[in-house]
Image (tube, rainbow, N blue to C red):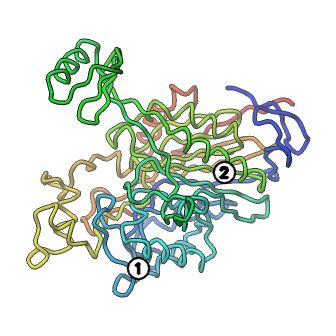
Amino acid sequence: MEKDLHENSRHPIHHDGGFDTVGSIATNVEDGFTMAAVGDLLLARPVTKGYHPGLADVLMIFEKADVTFGNLETNILAVRSKGCPQAEYGGAYCVSVPELGPDLKAMGFNMLSRANNHTLDWGLEGMQETSRALDENGITHAGAGENLAQAGAARFLETSRGRVALVSFATTFEPMARACDPAGEAPGRPGLNALRLIKSIVVPREMLESLRRIREVLPGYNPAGQEPNRVVLEGVIYKAGDKADYSFEADPRDVADILRNVRRGKQFSDFCIVTNHGHEPGEWSQEPPDYEQSFARRLIDAGADAYIVHGPHLLRGIEVYKGRPIFYSLGNFFCQDLRTPVGADMFEVYGKDPRVDTDAEVTVDEVAKGYPTAEGLVGSQSDAVYYESVVAMSRFEHNQLAELKLYPIELGRSKRFANRGVPRLAPAPQARAILERLQKLSEPFGTHIEIETGVGFIRMRPSSS
C-alpha cells in the first residue's frame, strides 16, 4: 500500500498536494475522527416513525460517527403547492414530503450530496425547496445551487474533531440540469455541479474498419480530418481496441473546476469529502469506468480525504490511496421504488393512462420493464446485488485511515413491493456473501478485507513520518 509522506499533518511537511500561497492542504482532524458513508438515499417517505424492523440497528452505527454521509436522490417538497414535474427528468420522478427533512436529521445524517440525475425532476422550485428543507434541519449539503460557482463550492460542517468540507458533482445528469456561471450580460443558470464525460465505444480493429466503410457510403461524408483509430457515426464515437468496451474522457474544464473547488474546500477545512453520482459505464457493471481511478487519485492529491461514488445502485470495489479511502460505489442505502405522485410524461413513456392506471402501476412498470417474477414485479435492477450494500465506517488516526469497518445491509428485496427498500443488518449467511463479493471486487485495487463476525475490516499499518 502506498504510504503518505507524513504521519501527522499538523506539522508543515511537504507532500504531493504541495503548498499554495495561503497554506497547505494538510489534513488536520483529531485522532479518532470517524466518517460513516452510505450510497443512494432513494426515499419516498419518512421512515423513523414507521414499522421497519431492523432499521434502528442500522442507525445505531451512525451514533459513533462525526460525519454521516449519503447521496440524497430525491426532492423534498409539498408538491400540491410547489414545483411541477419536468419534461426532462432522471428516469423517474423522485419526490418525498417535507417531513423527510427532520426524518433525515433524526436518522443521523449531517452531510448529503445533491448532484445527481434527479436534482431537477421537480424543476428549479423543487431543487430550492429541497435546499430549504435541509437548511432548516441543519444538514450540510453540496452539489446544487443558483449558478455553477454555488453548485460546485465546498460546503462545511463543524464537528468536535475538526471542520469537514463536502464537494459534490455528477457525471450522470440530465442536460438541462447542468449549472453555469454568468457570461457577460447573461445571468448564471441554477442546477447541479457537472463533470461532463465524452463516451466512446471500443471495438476490435476489424469492426472499426467495417464502421468506417459504412460511414464512407453515407451522405455528407468528408474524408478530410478522418483519424485512423477513430470513427464518428451519427454522433457516436468508435475507437479501436483489444476488446469491445466503453471508454470515457473527462472534460478538462470541468476537471479543473472540480480540482480547484477541492483544493479550496480543503484550505478552509480540516477534512474534505468528495463525492460523485455516476452510472458509468452502466448500472450492470460492478467495475468503475476506465477514467475514474486516475481521477480519484488526482482528487486525493488535490486535498480530498475520501472519494465516494454512488449511482450504479450496486457495490463496487474499495481502494486505499495515500491513506485515504476510495469507494467506487456504495450502492443503495434506501431503495423505495414505489413513489407518488408521478408526472404525466412518465405515464406516457410506459404506455399508461393516468385516468385509468395508478401511480403504483406506472412505477412498477418502470422498475419491472415488463418482466414479472414470483417475487413480484421487478426487472432490470431486480437482482439481489441492488438490494445489498454496506455501511462504511472510516476511522482516522494521525490524519490517515487507520481502520475501515464494513457493515453488510440488505433492503428487503423479498418483501411486498410497497415495503421494500429500507435497510436492516444482513443475516449471517447473506452478510458473508456480501463481504466476500466486496473482497473480490476490491482485490484489483490491492485492498485486503478481513471478515470477522459478519463485519468486514480493512486495517492499515501505521506509517512512519
Could you tell me which residue is drawn at 53 percent across and 52 percent down?
169
In the depicted view, which residue is nearer to us: 171 or 370?
171
Query: In which quadrant is the N terminus drawn?
Result: top right
Give 47 or 453, whichever is nearer the viewer.
Answer: 47
Question: Badge 2 is on which residue?
Answer: 261
Q: Residues within 10 Å of mark 1 (few under 14, many from 20)?
A: some
Looking at the rendered structure, the kind of residue marked 1 is: Val
In-image side of 148 versus 6 (left or right): left
Quarter of the image where the C terminus is located: top right
- Callout 2 environment at 10 Å: few (<14), some (14 to 19), or many (20+)? many
- Circle 2 — which element? helix
In front of the other: 448 or 145: 145
Q: Which quadrant of the view contains residue 211?
A: top left
Return the mark for residue 97: 1
Residue 310 versus residue 17 in the image, above or below: below
As measured in the structure, the alpha-carbon distance from the residue carrying label 2 to the one carrying label 1 is 32 Å
Please name the amino acid that badge 2 sits on. Asn
- Seen as rendered, the residue at the extreme right is 11
Q: Residue furthest top?
A: 206
Most extreme residue toward the bottom is 81
Residue 261 located left or right of residue 463: left
Q: Position of residue 223 (x, y in %)?
A: 27, 19
Q: Residue 28's spot in the image, x, y percent? A: 82, 50
